[in-house]
Image (cartoon, rainbow, N blue to C red):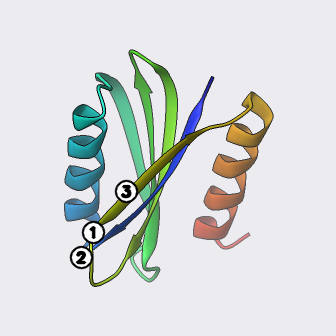
Amino acid sequence: MPTIGFAKIEGGPGEALKFVLKKLREEGYEVTFYRHHWAGDMPFGLVIAETNKGKVAVRWYLGREFTFKLEEVSEEAFEDFIDETLDYIGGD
């Protein structure tokens, strides 16, 4: 099953990507490929990864703390999660 996640990080897009990839490794995910999407004027972004455990998409937000949560979802919910986030980032 695909997995979605939510992360709150302190820093910027570079720190967010490092944090998400580190947390995925700690959870036993071996990332084989990833894409990172964000817009400079928005305090959030999306990391989409292909891993040894399947597809993962993590939406990150800027904040004053570090949190990380993952949950398995249906293929349809996974695609909706990505589409909604990318639409918002793109301003659609």
Quarter of the view holding residue 74? top right
Residue on which the image places disc 3: 68
**Number of numbered discs overlaid on the protein picture:** 3
Asked if the residue at tag 2 contacts the one at tag 1, i.e. Cβ–Cβ closer than 8 Å, the answer is yes
- Which amino acid type is shown beneath numbered disc 3? Phe
User: Is 3 left, or right, of 40 in this rendering?
Assistant: right
Report crowding for label 1: few under 14, some 14 to 19, many 20 or more residues within 10 A (C-alpha): some
Q: Nearer the viewer, residue 53 or 18?
A: 53
Which is nearer the N-term, disc 3 or disc 2?
A: 2
Quarter of the view holding residue 78? top right
Q: CA distance from mark 1 to mark 2?
A: 7 Å
Q: Secondary structure at mark 1?
A: loop
Asked if the residue at tag 3 contacts the one at tag 1, i.e. Cβ–Cβ closer than 8 Å, the answer is yes
Quarter of the picture containing the C terminus is bottom right
Q: Nearer the viewer, residue 18 or 90?
A: 18
The disc at residue 10 is: 2
Report crowding for label 3: few under 14, some 14 to 19, many 20 or more residues within 10 A (C-alpha): some
- Which amino acid type is shown beneath numbered disc 2? Glu
> x%, y% of residue 79?
71, 39
Quarter of the picture containing the N terminus is top right
Q: CA distance from mark 1 to mark 3?
A: 7 Å
Instruction: Give the residue displayed 75% in from the left and 41% down from the top.
Output: 77
The disc at residue 66 is: 1
Q: CA distance from mark 3 to mark 2?
A: 12 Å
Q: Nearer the viewer, mark 1 or mark 2?
A: 1
Instruction: Give the residue displayed 44% in from the left and 83% down from the top.
Output: 41
Report crowding for label 2: few under 14, some 14 to 19, many 20 or more residues within 10 A (C-alpha): some
Instruction: Give the residue displayed 24% in from the left and 76% down from the top.
Output: 10
> x%, y% of residue 7?
40, 61
Which is nearer the N-term, disc 1 or disc 2?
A: 2
